[in-house]
Image (cartoon, helix red, strand yellow):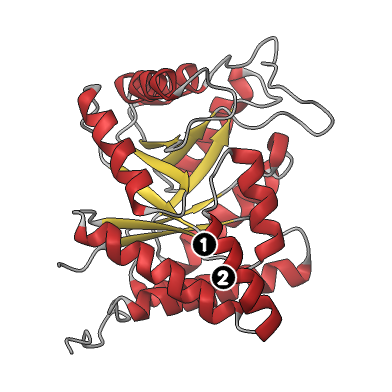
Amino acid sequence: MSTPSLSFEFFPPKSLEGSFRLWDCVNTLAPLAPTFVSVTYGAGGTTRKLTHEAVSTIHKTSGLNVAAHLTCVDATREETLEIAQSYAEAGVREIVALRGDAPKGQTTFTAHPDGFASSVELIEALADTGQFTIRVGAYPEKHPEAVDQAADIAFLKRKIDAGATSAITQFFFEADTFFRFRDACVKAGITAPILPGILPIENWTGTQKFAAQCGTHIPQVIHDAFATATRDGTTDLLATALATELCDDLLRGGVDHLHFYTLNRPELTRDVCHALGIAPKGQLQNVA
């Protein structure tokens, strides 16, 4: 197997302590030479300004290729495109274009009267500027609001046709889940790269809640394993082993890029990469 390319997702800090944690995360993972790193929006676009500041600072200080998340939530078309233009002016030329979650207190997404009604509209507008590489989200286990996976994949194709160049999946726990999704996308005529999203389980309770919200199935064997590991105080070891095994299965199945959801906790992601034989740039790979 060849060494995969990597990318990492961070979220913007909301406090001084959070800022230190973010920069520690960047400094820990930057030596692994990611193709890009992305910075999220909070639910309902609540961290729009913080995201912009984090993206700009990481781009200026680290030299990393930064992809800024941009959503359709609670903003006019003009405001959204102004944000995109400010990224371009700062030298940031990658955007992860998303519809976004409903604002706090709401259960469903409602477009701003003067805003983009969907991620497809946002992607088309960004593509028309000719200034960005556009990535989008994908759901290997069906978006919770989708009728079925066929409809989900058809919508993904619309996003690719609108101008996106690749898709990043929601996290999942079995390699076959990704392979079935990838094959279905190819069958639907999607030729753009689909990057698997990997979530090393840093917080078991939080992961279960997150999985329930986004429709991610957690196999019973993982529930059982974490029950034992929680009792024995070995949850980090288990999380590293599970994520490493998942990534190894993906690589053996032809995947050449891994996207990690770091939750601004870099140690597990770093340890998984090292376990896969991915060394910091400038160091020799472990070929044993």
Look at the image and tell me in which quarter the N terminus lies. bottom left
Look at the image and tell me in which quarter the C terminus lies. bottom left
Mark 2 closeness class: few <14, some 14–19, many ≥20 residues within 10 Å: some
Among the 4 quarters of the image, the one containing residue 223: bottom right
The residue sitting at 35% across, 80% down in the picture is: 275
The residue sitting at 70% across, 17% down in the picture is: 110
The residue sitting at 52% across, 72% down in the picture is: 239
- Badge 2 marks a residue whose secondary structure is helix
Q: Is residue 18 above or below residue 285?
A: above
Q: In this view, does 144 lie to the left or right of 50?
A: left
Task: Pinpoint residue 279: horizontal percent, then vertical percent.
Answer: 30, 81
The residue sitting at 43% across, 17% down in the picture is: 151
Q: What residue type is labelled 1?
A: Val
Task: Pinpoint residue 230: horizontal percent, then vertical percent.
Answer: 68, 76
Q: In this view, does 31 lie above or below 12?
A: below
Closest to the observer, 34 or 157: 157
Label 1 to label 2, Cα distance in Å?
6 Å
From the image, tell me which residue sits under label 2. Answer: 225
Q: What residue type is labelled 2?
A: Ala
Task: Pinpoint residue 195: horizontal percent, then vertical percent.
Answer: 34, 47
- Badge 1 marks a residue whose secondary structure is helix
Closest to the observer, 121 or 62: 121
Among the 4 quarters of the image, the one containing residue 65: bottom left
From the image, tell me which residue sits under label 1. Answer: 221
Do residues under tags 1 and 2 come within 8 Å of each other at their CB atoms? yes
Q: Which mark is residue 120?
A: none
